[in-house]
């Protein structure tokens, strides 16, 4: 394959390095231009192509006139990997993500997996499933080892790259704090990504991402910079994953699907919510300012039917009478039935119309 590129750079009397990226044939390369002053009239630019495996290939050089701001038509040749159909399926294998890969070779210390653009990745022997052999599919998590080499594990992390998690600090060191995220190798929370000094034994809500400098997986407690980076495209009533991330005068702030901020209003919460807690929720409203109002109860016909059945079962278990009604505090109704007062009133209204219960001054009675 031949790829033509044009290089645009200012020429200085000192060494200059620039690293633009180029994608071709779905293979990502970084081209490193090292500009060296060779004489008063000319400088010399050396080109390296860096593949995702972090292997460097010297591919050419060009002489630049000092009075020129442009060097063009640098022709590069490189033979990219040839992928099979299996590779095409595995091209999406990414560091910091779980994926299913094919076993392609067995060795004494483990098995090698086909990770597409990441190459052959080792799954160490202690993680290899019993009776595993070439051709088998294995679900793994990919990360870099201490030598910056991609490696696999069958352990499941508490969160992946691009997700938030509430993680406990197990140690601190010269580079930052180390968090337990479910793998043998702890997750680094660098000093520069801490909102306050992390303490051993304390837990922190962090975002997991790749450090662009070295492709290592790290955490950041400065979560705001990772939220609301894309438009909030949701439908009312859509089920979402929530992480409780704080409180305000309105209620609870929650991270929605690891991407956006939302709020659960205080008057709609009738149970204790913990900081860092994960739970399902629903989109109540997408406001004009693109902010999200959330609810913990869906409120559709199916849920109403379930709540009605729950009330009938409670009445039967209580001998046909429950001291719950319009004057009962919302917290009491939630503690007894696990539903909001609004949902309770809607459900007993439907049961009353169906002739299944009577609504009395201080409670409801089964008919």
Image: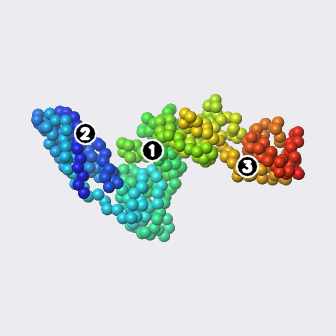
Question: Along the line of sight, which residue is nearer the eye, 41 or 292?
Answer: 292
336 vs 210, left or right, is right
Label 1: how many residues lie within 10 Å, few (<14), some (14-19) or many (20+)? Answer: many
Secondary element type, mark 2: strand
The answer to whether residue 42 of the structure is visible from this angle is yes
Secondary element type, mark 1: strand
**Residue at 32% over, 55% down:** 25
* Disc nearest the viewer among 3 and 2: 3
Q: Which residue lies furthest to the top in this view?
A: 249
**Residue at 31% over, 62% down:** 82
Which residue was labeled with disc 3? Answer: 304
Disc on the earlier residue, 1 or 2: 2
Q: In this view, does 85 lie above or below 71?
A: below
Q: In this view, does 173 lie above or below 25?
A: above
Disc on the earlier residue, 3 or 2: 2
Give coordinates of residue 128: x percent, y percent: 47, 63
**Residue at 67% over, 34% down:** 266
Q: Residue 198 carries which label?
A: none
Label 3: how many residues lie within 10 Å, few (<14), some (14-19) or many (20+)? Answer: some
Question: Along the line of sight, which residue is nearer the eye, 105 or 212?
Answer: 212
Question: Along the line of sight, which residue is nearer the eye, 72 or 207?
Answer: 72
Which residue was labeled with disc 2? Answer: 17
The answer to which image quadrant residue 326 occupies is: top right
Which residue was labeled with disc 1? Answer: 209
Question: Along the line of sight, which residue is nearer the eye, 43 or 342?
Answer: 342
Spatial separation of the CA atoms under disc 3 and disc 2:
64 Å
Q: In this view, does 86 lie above or below 75?
A: below
Give coordinates of residue 118: x percent, y percent: 37, 56
């Amino acid at each position: 394959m031949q790829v033509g590129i044009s290089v645009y750079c200012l020429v200085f009397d000192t060494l200059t390095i620039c690293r633009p990226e180029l994608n071709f044939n779905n293979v990502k390369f970084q081209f490193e231009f090292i500009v060296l002053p060779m004489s008063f009239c000319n400088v010399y630019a050396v080109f390296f192509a860096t593949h995702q495996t972090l292997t460097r290939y010297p591919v050419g050089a060009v002489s630049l006139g000092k009075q020129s701001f442009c060097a063009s038509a640098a022709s590069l040749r490189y033979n990219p990997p040839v992928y099979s159909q299996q590779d095409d399926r595995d091209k999406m294998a990414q560091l910091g993500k779980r994926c299913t890969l094919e076993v392609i070779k067995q060795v004494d210390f483990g098995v090698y997996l086909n990770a597409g653009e990441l190459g052959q990745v080792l799954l160490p022997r202690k993680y290899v499933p019993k009776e595993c052999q070439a051709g088998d599919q294995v679900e793994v998590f990919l990360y870099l080892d201490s030598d910056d080499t991609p490696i696999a594990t069958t352990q499941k992390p508490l969160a992946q790259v691009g997700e938030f998690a509430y993680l406990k600090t197990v140690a601190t060191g010269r580079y930052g704090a180390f968090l337990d995220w479910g793998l043998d190798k702890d997750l680094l929370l660098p000093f520069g990504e801490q909102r306050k000094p992390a303490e051993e034994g304390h837990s922190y809500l962090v975002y997991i991402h790749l450090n662009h400098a070295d492709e290592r997986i790290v955490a950041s407690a400065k979560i705001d910079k990772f939220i609301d980076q894309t438009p909030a495209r949701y439908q009312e009533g859509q089920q979402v994953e929530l992480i409780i991330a704080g409180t305000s005068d309105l209620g609870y702030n929650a991270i929605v699907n690891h991407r956006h901020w939302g709020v659960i209003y205080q008057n709609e919460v009738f149970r204790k919510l913990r900081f860092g807690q994960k739970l399902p929720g629903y989109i109540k409203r997408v406001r004009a300012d693109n902010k999200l109002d959330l609810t913990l109860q869906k409120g559709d016909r199916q849920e109403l039917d379930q709540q009605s059945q729950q009330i009938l079962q409670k009445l039967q278990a209580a001998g046909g009478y429950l001291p719950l009604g319009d004057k009962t505090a919302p917290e009491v109704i939630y503690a007894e039935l696990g539903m909001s007062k609004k949902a309770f009133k809607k459900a007993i209204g439907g049961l009353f119309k169906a002739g299944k219960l009577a609504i009395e001054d201080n409670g409801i009675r089964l008919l």
